[in-house]
Amino acid sequence: MADSVSTPTRTNFIRQIVQDDLASGRHARVVTRFPPEPNGYLHIGHAKSIVLNFGLAEDLGGVCNLRFDDTNPGKESPEFVAAIKADVRWLGFDWPGPARFASDYFEQLYGFALELIEKGLAYVCDLSGEETRAYRGTLTAPGRDSPYRTRSVEENRDLFRRMRAGEFPDGARTLRAKIDMAAPNINLRDPVLYRIRHGVIHHQTGNEWCLYPTYDYTHPISDALEGITHSLCTLEFEDHRPLYDWCVANVSVPSRPRQIEFSRLNLEYTVMSKRLLTQLVSERIVAGWDDPRMPTIAGLRRRGYTPGAVRGFCERIGVTKADNLVEMGVLESAIRDELDASAPRAMAVLEPLRVVLTNLPADAPAAVRAQNHPKDETMGTRALPLASVLFIDRSDFEETPPKGFKRLIPEGEVRLRNAYVIRCDEVIKDADGAVTELRCSVDPDTLGKNPEGRKVKGVIHWVAAETAVRAEVRLYDRLFSVPQPGAGAGPGERDFREDLNPESLRTLSGAMLEPSLAEAEPGARFQFEREGYFVVDPDSTPARPIFNRTVTLRDTWAKAQGASAAGASKAGGQRGRGQKAPAGGPGQAQGASAQALGAAGGVA
């Protein structure tokens, strides 16, 4: 699997249950399944389930099926089927044989429904949807029997066959299980098993059916038909487990799967509801399901996340029964750790300021050499063209510097990364007083070595103007500005869109990059020194390079949260770029002097 990293497997209560079942001989081989509904793109919460189901089977010598629970064709599409397959494979997993569909079992499910009717365990009900809800009762009051509950087996069989034949309009009749209208668990109060849907073209079966089974009926029987040993699902299905068990116990399926629930993934600064994600897409708040701000696997991939980082994150948060809210910083840390070790370094000036070196020596090298990775010599070096006209980042110069500013100031010195020490001699401004150019002098004796008799504290990145590659750089940040969008507003809650982060995307169309990045292929990842980690966007071309920011070098959100209210308010406007890191990025001799770091480059 490309881009993968090995992550230690942690034990959890589900793994222990499965191992005990194998050790006791209850099962000879573990068989799990990942059963998405094809009504949207998968998100990071699905990734947790994928890693659990596929990873558990893989580790214990079993298999995991991919099965689409496609019982609601009005909201499903082949696009979602293809996207889900691609996401599972991108994460490094595969399934035995072809992908399965619940619709593969529609004929068998229909037969099992007839079996329930013959056993007196299902009946055709003529109550409307609203009436059915009224008869169901409440959490504190029992339900009432439908007036159609006592229909004979013969009448139910006849009506159900006529439902399949299309004789009745939508909503006229349903098939319901006959369980217990006084059951404390409301899911057992004669749940609907089949409903009529005319005019729907199913993406697998076309117009063959106008009678569709419900999810709660289809899912357990599909598991049983596939010989699933352990049906792993999130905690919201815990109250559905008695119905799951009832279904497989009362029809002649070949196996009895065991349903086990675990807590779903709740992640800060995003929404995980498929309904809300669909709203973001349909209202064009984001650019699509693969918008890099989305928590979808496709969005994370386009943002530059690797399969190894996503899998490592899922292992890191673990599997429990306790609901919790995971900090976004945990996910971001997973990709930082991987890219710090694997991403080659490059220099990119995101907001260029022109610098003219007035005395660049005639014998100055045409290029200097720079390491591709400060902690991995096997990644080699590259040539950085050097010329008398450069670009530096506008934020690396201040006419009136704040306290602690260690970069370029009027009459001050700074080290150009891998090159000379320069001094700012003159500041050129336009008619409005905006700085447009700096005239600087070079200390010719500082290439590859420290200056004599003084210390230069700052090191900045740069690119030569003549060979720089103009690119579009998209600075992505968290989509929402609060940890729990839409929460905390009382009974009605707050519209989650009110919490959208206006700084979640800044597009810089005039960034200047070192020439080695000109031919970078889509999907290639880099650390832009002192800026963050970036990936080449799928729409990028040599004529129009596009880079997406994956993550900043440091967690600037955590710093902002830890500040005072006033300080945090100010920090909010600065999150688009984050803070400059020392040259070389995190982990590169942070305590070393800027002189030593900057002088490391040689002559090409």
Image (spheres, grey):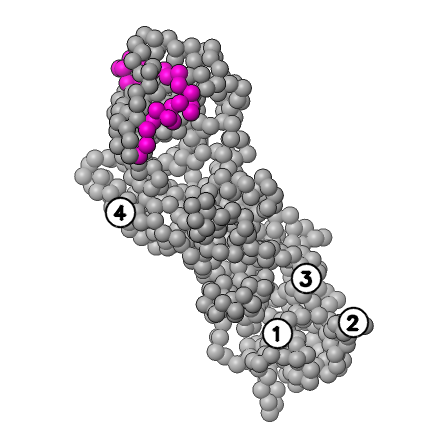
Q: Which residue is mark 2?
A: 432
Q: Which label belongs to residue 587?
A: none
The numbered dot on residue 511 is: 3
Helix, strand or loop at mark 2: loop
- Type of amino acid at the residue the image marks with label 2: Asp
Q: Which residues are magenta?
A: 117-139
**Residue type at the position of mark 3:** Ala
Q: Nearer the viewer, mark 4 or mark 2?
A: 2
Pointers 3 and 4 in contact (CB under 8 A)?
no
Residue at 30 percent across and 9 percent down: it is: 152
Mark toward the start of the polypeptide (4 vs 1)? 4
**Residue located 53% across and 62% down the image:** 552
Question: Mark 1 belongs to which amino acid?
Answer: Ile
Q: Mark 3 or mark 1: name the one nearer the start of the chain.
A: 1
Relative to 21, 161 lies left or right: right
Which mark is on residue 13? Answer: 4
For label 4, count other residues whose C-alpha is less than 10 Å away and answer few (under 14), some (14-19) or many (20+).
few
Residue at disc 3, secondary structure: strand
Spot occupied by residue 126 in the image (x, y as percentages of width and height) = 39, 16
Mark 4 and mark 2 lie on one chain; the one further toward the N terminus is 4
1 or 2: mark nearer the eye? 2
Mark 2 or mark 3, earlier in chain: 2
